[in-house]
Amino acid sequence: MATSLEGRQVVLQGCSCSDGLDSLCLFEADPDIAGIGILLSFIITACTTHLMVLYTYFFALQSDKRAPLGKLDRTITTEVRRACTWLFTPIARLITNDGKLHRMWQVLVQGDSLFPILVILTDQQIITGLAIITVGYAKTGTMTEYHFALVSNLATLTVVVHDSVANVLRHRTTHHSVNMQAYKAIAVICFMMMALVAQIPSGHQYWLVSYGLPVQCIWNSINGNIRSNTPQSAVMGTSLFLYTWAIIVTVDDYFPKLSSWAFDNAFVRAANIYFLKAILLPRTAYFASARKRALAKTELATILWSIFEWSCFLMAAVIFTLCEVLNSEVLDLQRIWLLLITSIQTIFVLRDYAGRNGRVGNEDGWGFGQAVPIFLLLIPLSTILEAIYGTPVEVEEMA
């Protein structure tokens, strides 16, 4: 049964591809996908993990020579630590005088205590992420565009978590079984590839025009509906680029020998040499022009060589700054944080707009499907409490 509203066909009962890609379709709320418990589980885990990663970079990895920190990273982390020391000196004195608070602080400042917590959080996130994106693909024929968009953004939260954590744990993975490390890496990479493919519908010119239309209609009409001059295609292109970047970084973090093997050939080595020479060319030209200026015999030649010298200096300074920024892990974490905030905002904007685009029912209720993900958050919490209050057991006591 259908009617018309402001030029758009309104489907009151059921919705199919034959109703049109711009139809306003009524659809039932699905708390198992868009429920507040599911969303909070993903968001709390993602934000907690990323905050712990930021803390690890700024504090726990500062003195670790194996840590993936460059000169710019160590400069930033040093200044942050200095500022925090100045700001929180009164609190630090209070912590030192209180036994329980001092124990908690020792757990926080020791990187070895944080890494197991990060591992548990990422493991939980990949399991829930694989579960929800598998459901998204399995129910493509009946799942609405709105719910598939939520699945895609929840998958982005999981990708963000692993993108930020993988490099922190890179120099710690040698303590674990090689087979377990490989299995986890394969699961993470497979998930990221599934999440990457889930971004393709966002480039469709009719994407989210009809919230209640089955997402299968978008997949069926992909050809000819992804156009380069539309905002949707720009969003899709950016998402695919960021996902590809995350996959490459993750493969390199989990399998560093693979990337070493890929670059260990004469062609790549020669390309790297020429690339480095191109980057260092302004620096080389700067020193050469300085020598030419010193040997110039006329005032005009001196002025011209001085102009060229300072031009090369400015170019070399810009290239040096860009290289430091692009290789900075700390600044890259801010990019990941921005992606995290954007995904969370998109999720709640979609839920808000869904009520005005055909959603029937409420997705804020709490049920069994909402409680389980929240209770799963107790697993990393128990690890944190064990690290704070646990007492190491001596071998003699166990005998």
Image: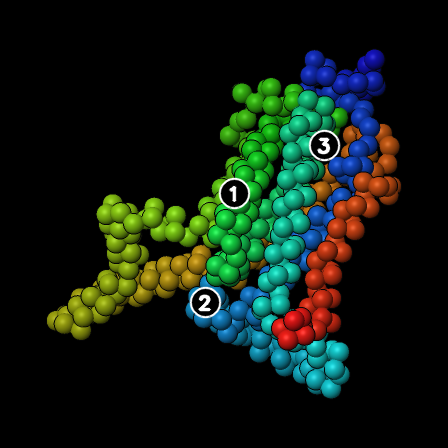
- Dot 2 or dot 3: first in sequence order is 2
Q: Quadrant of the C terminus?
A: bottom right
- Give the image location of residue 266, x and y in percent: 23, 47
- Give the image location of residue 293, x and y in percent: 19, 70
- The answer for how far apart the CA atoms under marks 3 and 1 are is 29 Å
Mark 1 and mark 2 residues within 8 Å of each other at the beta carbon: no
Q: Which residue is mark 3?
A: 146
Q: Which mark is residue 92?
A: none
Q: Quadrant of the N terminus?
A: top right
Q: Out of 315 and 34, give the one closest to the viewer.
A: 34
Q: Which residue is mark 1?
A: 186
Q: Residue 59 appears in which quarter of the rendering?
A: bottom right
Q: Which residue is mark 2?
A: 66
- The answer for how far apart the CA atoms under marks 1 and 2 are is 25 Å
Q: Nearer the viewer, mark 1 or mark 2?
A: 1
Residue at 62% x, 61% y: name it.
Answer: 116
Callout count: 3
- The answer for how far apart the CA atoms under marks 2 and 3 are is 44 Å
Q: Secondary structure at mark 2?
A: loop
- Give the image location of residue 227, x and y in percent: 53, 27
